[in-house]
Amino acid sequence: MVNNLKININNKTMKTLKSLLAGIILLFICVAANASVKPVAGSLSKDDVIKIYIDAIAHGQTENLGAALDNYLQYETKRGDDVTTFTKEQLIDYLKNNGAPSESVTTNTLVFSDDEKSSVVKVEFKYNDFVRTDLITLSKSKGWKITKIESSFK
């Protein structure tokens, strides 16, 4: 009878240990799965970034532009044969100091290439007397950012 009691206690202990171990493993799996796919809080989508950029250029709304531009932004403006290069800070300062053109503008966008890590978008700003065409490169690391802008005027 004592031997049966020992075996019975050992079986109960083993079942409890197996259940406990299975629960711990399940807990680790859930934590690992949850931790691997969290988006960065406050990260912008591609559409958000393009909208912020268009609002800054067309309407002078620069409040959120810094969040949409990469710290190492390459901005080039082409007027004929002249090419002017700006940094992120220079572009934001220029837009803040000069505001938006007073005339009406219409915009058209066209996506040239798009995948999980990068996108190239063409944005045309049509004013009364000229057209500004921006070729915008976006990259994704911890959220979408504009990394390069090539701007030309016609």
Image (tube, rainbow, N blue to C red):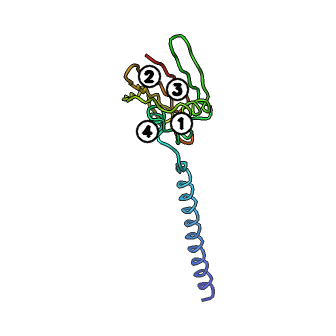
Alpha carbon of mark 2 to alpha carbon of mark 3: how far?
A: 12 Å
Query: Residue shown at 53%/54% (left/top)?
Result: 33
Quickly name the residue at label 1: 145
Q: Secondary structure at mark 1?
A: strand
Q: Secondary structure at mark 3?
A: strand
Quickly name the residue at label 2: 132
Label 4 sits on what residue type? Asp
Quadrant for the N terminus in the image: bottom right
Give the number of the disc on residue 47.
4
Query: Residue shown at 53%/59% (left/top)?
Result: 30
Percent x, y of residue 92: 57, 33
Sequence-earlier tag: 1 or 2: 2
Q: Nearer the viewer, mark 2 or mark 3?
A: 2
Work out whether residue 51 or residue 38 is closer to the camera in this orientation and state it: 51
Sequence-earlier tag: 2 or 4: 4
Query: Residue shown at 39%/19% (left/top)?
Result: 129
Alpha carbon of mark 1 to alpha carbon of mark 2: how far?
A: 21 Å
Label 1 sits on what residue type? Lys
Mark 3 touches mark 1? (CB < 8 Å):
no
Alpha carbon of mark 3 to alpha carbon of mark 1: how far?
A: 11 Å
* Vertical order, 30 against 86 (above or below): below
